[in-house]
Each structure stands twice: as structure tokens, then as C-alpha cells.
Amino acid sequence: MTDPADLTIADAGARLRAGELTAVDLLDAVRRRASMTEAILHAYLTIDHAGASEAAAEADAALARGEDRGPLHGIPVALKDNMVTRGVETTASSRILAGWVPPYDATVVQRLRAAGAVIYGKTNLDEFAMGSSTENSAYGTSRNPWDPDRVPGGSSGGSAAAVAVGSAFGALGSDTGGSIRQPAALCGVVGMKPTYGLVSRYGLIAFASSLDQIGPLGRTVEDAAMLFEAITGYDPFDATSSPGPVPAVRASLDGGVDGLRIGVLSELASEGVEPSVAAAFHDTLDRLGAAGATIEEVSLPTTKHALSAYYLIAPAECSANLARFDGVRYGPRIDGPNVEQMMAATRRDGFGPEVTRRILLGTYALSAGYYDAFYGQAQRVRTLVVREFAAAYERFDALVTPTSPTTAFPVGARADDPLAMYLSDVCTIPSNLSGDPAISVPVGLDESGLPIGFQVLGPALGDDTVFRVARTVESLVGFAARPALATSEGAV
């Protein structure tokens, strides 16, 4: 009999409703898997055993009463630890928030609970979501389930690893420059960044507010779509929340690509891309063409400058957002002879080197005399990126690139080279600047057996098209590999 931890959300839900499994059974399955893999992977920072047990028992009781809250009812899921959870420590992987227990739930957490999901635990991330490898966590590095000597990507590396290995059926991550899609690609799962504004950021610990977006990770496109539909929709607590209708993504999943116009972003699909990644990418393009899509190369020259613009805009916003962590309102405090020195000592002790680097960079970019030369210029580049993408979507229904130019790299290989680390996100950052939706779906393995991701981008509120193309890619490629750790035999 299949271990329940290996089921998709859709299959687990079907067996739950058929009476073959209970929500407690599903929770026990992910607990067993976590007990076998966490010593290696360190995907979780906190596992809420008591809260998850209570929620699973309530889900079973509700089904017994005839109350079915939808496809996530009774399904154990994980949350990146930068989403606040009432009564459960939330640290954003930073020492400066150690011990902080929020008094409220983020909107996405409220919506998952309302959908009947069982919140199993909080996953590891790069501190305040700043990084591409989950090596910047103050609480230790997460590992890739396909090869524990390699990184799982970041910053949502813990969420991606948990889904890949089966210690969660699905998870939420946050994506400021690719932090859902890049780890999804490196761990062989599906990761999606919705259109900016479709998912409330209320209760998400802010990194760069104009770029941050919460999104789902799942083992299949359908699983990701179920999570997407559960968390989207207008929220009056988020001033940037979209008041309009949400695309019905599951209804369009099986629409195929016949007749769709798909553009290949030439600036992001060639230079610096590893041969195995390029081969899998072009093989997938051939399959899409054979399925009826029109494939054509398109050049968006400004995307070459997107990375530079991002690393001025994001640090500038983070320097403002993280000013609130000063030893007064949250977490630990380092005493000093006066208030100013207490705040300086607390921030010096509480923030790690990557966060400190970005705060300094952002503060410099916003300082008098440099604001227009750096931050203002970066915002002008962002405007050009937005315009170029909008013009491209007048010709194309979707754009595609590799998700990451490389597969998972060894732990520590880029730790002392920030620029090399930043290049990990070169394919994902443009859609954060434009605010458009994008998704990564696994399409193969390289010669070392590491997953390769294929990225689909779409116009604002074109989330249904993005899911539709991704579902077609999934069915055409038939990627079904799982890491060795995701089995009872492989786990230790």
C-alpha cells in the first residue's frame, strides 16, 4: 500500500472522502516522514504537534458531521516562517525575532484554517527571506532532498524541501525575487508566484513590500492550484490587495495549449544556462509546439538590467521595513547605556551578515545625494521592464524561460560570493518587478540526478493561463521522479 505521505493533495483528499484514510492518518504519515528526514534536511524550524493534532481531529469530526470545507480539508500543510501564526513562534529565521509569539494569524493562515487545512509546522528560510540557498538562516542550513550536500534553493528552501520529501502535502512560500520558484525548481516541485495583489500580505513579515508575494508549493500543478484558490481574494487589511475577481485557475487547468502563442525570452534562455538545463528547456518547447502552441523567440532588452534594478529597490525597501526591529517591540534586547546604543547593539547582534549587507546597501541608495542616481534610476528601469512585458503580452499569451540557469549547487559554494548567489535569481526577478504571475514546473533531471525547472510567465491576472500552460507541460513531460529520501527505504 502506498505510504500516505507520498500522495498528492488531490489523491489524499479523495481517499479521505472515500473513508480509506482520516486526517489523523495523513498527519501521522507526515510526522513519520519528518521523523525520518528532518535530521538530514532541517526543513522545519517549528513543528506544532499539539495544534496540528487538534486540527486533524477537528477535521475528522467535521467530516463525520457532514461538513466538507473543500479540497484542503484535513490536509497537513507547512508555512514559511515569515508568516505570523497565532500562538506559534515566528522568527523569519532571524535571532532578532527569537521567542516572538504572534497574537494573530496572517490572512493566508486564517484562510487555510477556514479551508480545513492542518497547519503542521513552520519551515526554514534565509533570514527575512534574503537569499537563494537557505544558508542565511540563523538556525542552520536546510538541505536538498535530492542530494543533502546541495542547497534546496531559497529563500523558501524549507517549504520546497518539505513538499519534495513528503513531510508536508503542500506549503506556502513568499517570493520577492524568485524565492518560491527557484527552490521549487531545485527541489523538483511546483512553485507559483501569483499576480501581485491577489494574495494578501497581511501578516507576512515584510522584506520589500512592492515585490513580496505569498504563493503555493505543491507536488503537482493541481495541488498548487488548490492552495492558490484557498488563499487568494480581497483583504481589507492589505492596502495593496486587489478588489477584483480572482482567476478560476482549476477550471482552466485542462485547456491545453492548442492555439496559444508562447514567447521564449531570448535574454534569459541562453547565456549562462547549464547545458542540461538548456536541453530540458528546449525539449519542453518542442513538446509544447507539437501540442499546438506557436513558439517564437522574443527579445526584451531591459530584462538584462532587471537584476541590477532589483538589488537597489529590494534593499532600499528592506532598510525601511526592518527599521522596526530595534529591541523595543519584538524579540530579545541587548542593553546599552542609552536608547540609541541599545538599539544599535540589538540590531548588530540580531541581524546576520546578508541582512546587514542589504540594509547598508539600501540605506546608502536612499541617502541624500544618491537617491536619484541609484534608487530613482532603478525605479525608472522597473518602469521600462513593466512596459516591455506589457507590450510582449499583446503578442503572446505566455512567456517561458528556464526557472534557474543551474541545478542545485553545493552547500557553501556561493556563500562568499554574493554576486554569484544573486545571479541564481536572474530568470525569476523580472516578473517580481512587473508584478505578473509566474510558475515553475519540474521537467527533468540533470546528469547528477538533480531536478530542472521550467518557468511560465503570464500577464497580470493571467494566473489561469500560467496554470494552464504549466499543467500542459506537466502532462507532456510526465515528470514523476522523487528523491530517494522521499521513501521509507531512503529515509534514515
Image (spheres, grey):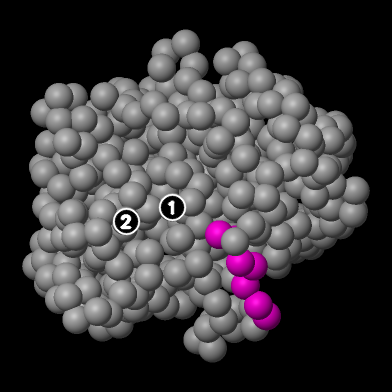
| Numbered mark located on residue 209 in the image | none
Which one is closest to the eye, mark 2 or mark 1? 2
The residue lying at 46 percent from left, 77 percent from top is 202
* Residue 288 located left or right of residue 232: right
Q: CA distance from mark 2 to mark 1?
A: 13 Å
* Residue 201 located left or right of residue 45: right
Q: Residues within 10 Å of mark 2 (few under 14, many from 20)?
A: some
Q: Is residue 267 visible?
A: no
Quick check: marks 2 and 1 in contact, CB under 8 Å? no
- Residue found at the far front of this picture: 18
Q: Nearer the viewer, residue 454 or 62?
A: 62
Percent from the top left, x then y, of residue 53? 11, 66
Instruction: Identify the amino acid type marked 2.
Output: Ala
Q: Nearer the viewer, residue 249 or 205?
A: 249
Which element type, helix, strand or loop, lies under badge 1? helix
Q: How many marks?
A: 2
Instruction: Identify the amino acid type marked 1.
Output: Asp
* Residue 417 located left or right of residue 64: right
Q: Residues within 10 Å of mark 1 (few under 14, many from 20)?
A: many
Q: Which residues are magenta?
A: 244-250
Q: Earlier in the sequence, mark 2 or mark 1?
A: 2
- Identify the image quadrant of residue 473: top right
